[in-house]
Amino acid sequence: MNLVADTEDVLRRLERTDLDQIDEQTAKLLVGQLAEVLRGHGHRYYVLDAPVIADAEYDRLFSALQTMEDRFPALAAPDSPTRRVGGEPLGAFQKVQHPEALLSLGNAFGADELRAWYERAQRGLAETFGEVEPALVAEPKIDGLALALTYVDRQLALGATRGNGRVGEDVTEHVRTIRAVPLRLAKVNEPQSVSAGQASLFDAAPPASPARIEVRGEAYLPKPTFERLNEALAAEGGKPFANPRNAAAGSLRQLDPQVTASRGLRFFAYGLGPVEGTTAPGTQHETLDWLRDLGFPVNERVQRFEDIEAVVRYCEAQSEQRDDLDYEIDGVVVKIDRTDYQDTLGAVANAPRWAIAFKFPAREATTRLNGIDLNVGRTGAIKPVADLEPVGIGGVTVSKATLHNADYIADRDIRIGDRVIVKRAGDVIPQVVGPIKEARTGEEVEWTMPDTCPACGEPIARIEGEAEFYCVSAACPAQTIRLVEHYASRGAMDIVGLGSNLAVQLVEADLVHRLDDLYRLIPDVLGALDGFKEKKIDNLLTGIEASKSRPLRSLLFGLGIRFVGATVAQLLVEHHESLDALAAATQDNLEAIHGIGPETARSVAEWFGHAPNRELVEALKSLGVNTARLPDEPVYTEAPTEGPLAGKTFVLTGTLPTLTRDEAKAKIAAAGGKVTGSVSSKTDFVVAGSSAGSKLSKAESLDIRILDEADLLDLLDS
Ligand code: IVH
């Protein structure tokens, strides 16, 4: 089958056919062809990740098939692509006995445990095979839920969850909705145009189609799908899932398969159960190849290794890259490649000796939520922070975690006293994922955002359309502390010796209410503070004095205006020579600056529009703080419309004797000229150096003036 040609063919036929008038005989032909083509596109999209038609075209084909099957129900094959929309809701799940138990895996925490497992396996093989160094296959351990899919005569006959390993639940109708799962196995040993061009993971000739086969793998939700699902659930007042694994399990274990269909589950195949009617491959890597040939998605990061040290390196690399993937993995499954070795090693209790899960450091733990504190940021944003019973996560003790905002707490129904799941991933701040409701005792207390700021007692407000609550009082000490801390930080005014402890001390001792108060501090007053000796006082005051001559961009950043980070501050200073000039700019003026968005422009204009802020600026100025652009700060310059080369277009080609390309470009631009990449009739000059190529010949053919470096410099001088 040639997918593209067949698709075009069927689209043409559809155009010529009136589906409402079609007779059953013609419909039968068309249905077969449509189903075939749709299967091919589904495979390309979900398995190969390489679609060749637009979604809308797919939808058109799909609805044509649906229309005909509705008209002639006898034509609807059990493995038709339309059967993925989810059948009738179930009253309850049927139990199914697995013919061969689905084992679980032992864990290796760290490289040494992995090496120890390998040595045990070698010892286990010694009696039968002598001293061997068995090859290994390493596979990302997908964090989803295990499925066993049985195909009889190539048709999907049963989909079952793992359950307790021996008895699972029949989720066949649900599995049908997972588009990455083939409803019908591809015929192997026959050229497959849908996978043409796809190199096999490993080079091996696949065995023939099996009469009956159980394929095992993991159903999972991609991270973006998971996030969208949670947003949608929260929006309709539902309960969000704690992680993609729970979301995958929850989406599959829905009595109504139509709900499952809407959830966007994916699937990776990783192994086999019983196989009948053909011989299964003799190694794990060939098994994966075969599964791929049969039409299953196989994880692209799977690799075969000859020695365990290479596997250790692979595991460590995967651990580092886990956030780059768009699905969750929680480790690497390492398997002995040869199946005869696997058989010899067998299993103890529930876990095979021939495979192990190398587990990444944990990122989640459960602990008790003792309380919810409020943190007032320098912009006045009030953020709830979880006060947790200390718990170790991946080698770090966590006792505080973010709860984001009041909506987050309400959506997840997080209560004080709950056992909660806490997650710490990479560099990000630990966060509370959600409560474990099953662990509730009834003593838990619901939480609501108070009406007043915990730091100053003034009312707090919620800005429309924002999740955050704000303390709007300019005199709020908590805000002042954060602001002083920020003002003194390295990227801002860089006041050495003024860190967060000192900021607290200064504000709580009533010495600093506003930033300008820093410049009014005197030795006598500081001497009265705890732990303030002469040297410390001296250092602090020297640091504060030095901050008066910082560049304007540092001051602007230090003021803590919402949305004005270091980069925006720099940009604003390039366009304004002083704080006064910036204060005079309107929101429109600001928005006209390339790189400043409407939110930022509004925030800056509002900040300067607020009288107390203008007073602050005046006070800083009168106390000697620099509020103007320093001579070495960059200034925005528009390309000059004047100059000796104004309006002239240049093309550079080849290597010039003394100037680099960038230097030549800058000189031309400074003189008002423009440099473009290709020669056309609009080009005025081509500057050619040594080994100039086709641009030079093109210029000659168009009769464009050609300059060398000396000519260019002459022109610039004129
Ligand atoms: S092999 C005997 N391979 O991890 C081998 N399992 O405790 C058993 N899992 O829930 C499984 N990715 O579904 C294997 N590439 C992979 C896997 C994998 C995820 C899951 C599996 C089960 C758990 C094993």
Image: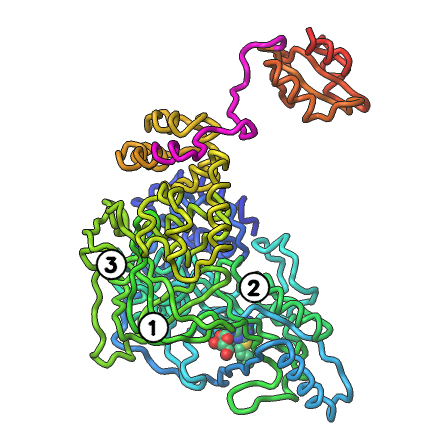
The span shown in magenta is 618-645
Location of residue 718 by image quarter: top right
Residue nearest the viewer, comparing 399 with 96 = 399
Write down the residue under mark 3: 454
Specify the amino acid type for callout 2.
Asn
Side (left or right) of 148 relative to 343? left
Camera-near label (2 vs 3) is 3
Whichever of callouts 2 and 3 sits on the residue coming sooner in the sequence is 2
Question: Which disc number belongs to residue 420?
Answer: 1
Magenta: main secondary structure equals: loop
Q: Secondary structure at mark 3?
A: loop
Specify the amino acid type for callout 1.
Val
Whether residue 216 is visible: no
Q: How many marks?
A: 3
Would you place residue 150 above or below residue 490 in this image?
below
Q: CA distance from mark 2 to mark 1?
A: 32 Å
Is 621 one of the magenta-colored residues? yes
Q: Position of residue 131 (x, y in %)?
A: 78, 86
Whether residue 252 is visible: yes
Write down the residue under mark 2: 299
Camera-near label (3 vs 1) is 3
Q: How is the image coloured?
A: rainbow
Mark 1 lies within 8 Å of ligand 1 (Cβ measured): no
Whichever of callouts 3 and 1 sits on the residue coming sooner in the sequence is 1
Q: CA distance from mark 2 to mark 3?
A: 51 Å
